[in-house]
Amino acid sequence: MFNKKTVNKSLKKYSNGIPVFYLIYSGANHTPGEVYEYPKEIQNKVEIKNLWEINEKYYNWKNKYSLFIQKSDKELIELIDTIIQFDPESLILLTGDHGAYMYRNAWMGDSKDPNENIINNGFKVETITKDCFEIFVALRYPKEKIDLTGASPVNYFRRIFYILSGGDRSFKNEVANDSFIPLQTKSSIFGKFKIYKTVENGQVLKEWVPIKEY
């Protein structure tokens, strides 16, 4: 992971007019993916097995996430200021890789249909989809406007490089702005996975649609 010191060092090394592409990872933590990843005092509350219930009732995830964001925002501002000092015309893209995962595993339950489980757990399917996939995106490029409206991450750089290349049509063709989630059909590591489509053409689906099993 880059920080202000390493970015400064790298920018000094490559600040000779040659275009340089950086991928910098920074940001908040995930919600725990398994019960054993929570603090011991929470693990001992054995009556709670669902991760989304733990996050809501015992882990106070919304407050913790807010504190993580405050810390990571400060680091990001330092990084951005450092980059702009070296190159005032730099293009900077900020985006997330997935949603907050507040309601992780809300699709699990007695039914083989995750849609039924989500509803039985008290949620709307759209709420869980947004929790998994809804992300922040911001773009800074002083030279020209680049419109990312309606684009998912798979098309960000197609739009960006189309502008930077002066309209190279090889970047013009976009792929579908769809999102998918793989769910294991059994809890065992030997269980198969089923792929569900959750977003189509940038629109959140009211139900997850089974696409493929492997």
Image (cartoon, grey):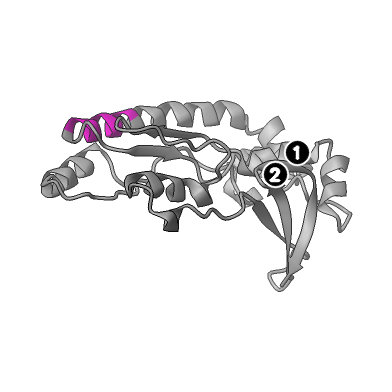
Image point 82% across, 44% down: which residue?
118
Q: Taking 107 as reference, is 91 above or below it? A: above
Image point 16% across, 50% down: which residue?
18
The type of residue carrying mark 1 is Glu
Image point 47% across, 52% down: which residue?
172
**Which residue has dot 2 on it?**
51
**Which residue has dot 1 on it?**
126
Earlier-in-chain disc, 2 versus 1? 2
Badge number at residue 49: none
Q: Taking 12 as reference, is 60 above or below it? A: above
Q: Is residue 62 magenta?
A: no
Image point 28% across, 34% down: which residue?
79
Position of residue 145 in the picture relative to residue 179 (left or right): left
Instruction: Give the image quarter of residue 133.
Output: top right
Residue 30 appears at what percent x and percent y?
A: 54, 43
Residue 96 appears at what percent x and percent y?
A: 49, 41
Position of residue 209 in the picture relative to residue 77 (left or right): right
The type of residue carrying mark 2 is Leu
The one nearer the camera, 18 or 81, is: 18
Q: Residues within 10 Å of mark 2 (few under 14, many from 20)?
A: many
Q: What distance separates the C-alpha of mark 2 from that of mark 1? A: 19 Å
Please state the extent of the stretch shown in magenta in the rendering.
77-85
Position of residue 67 in the picture relative to residue 2 (left or right): right
Quadrant placement of the C terminus: bottom right
Residue 183 appears at what percent x and percent y?
A: 72, 59
The one nearer the camera, 44 or 7, is: 7
The secondary structure type at the circle numbered 1 is: helix
Residue 17 visible in the shown view:
yes
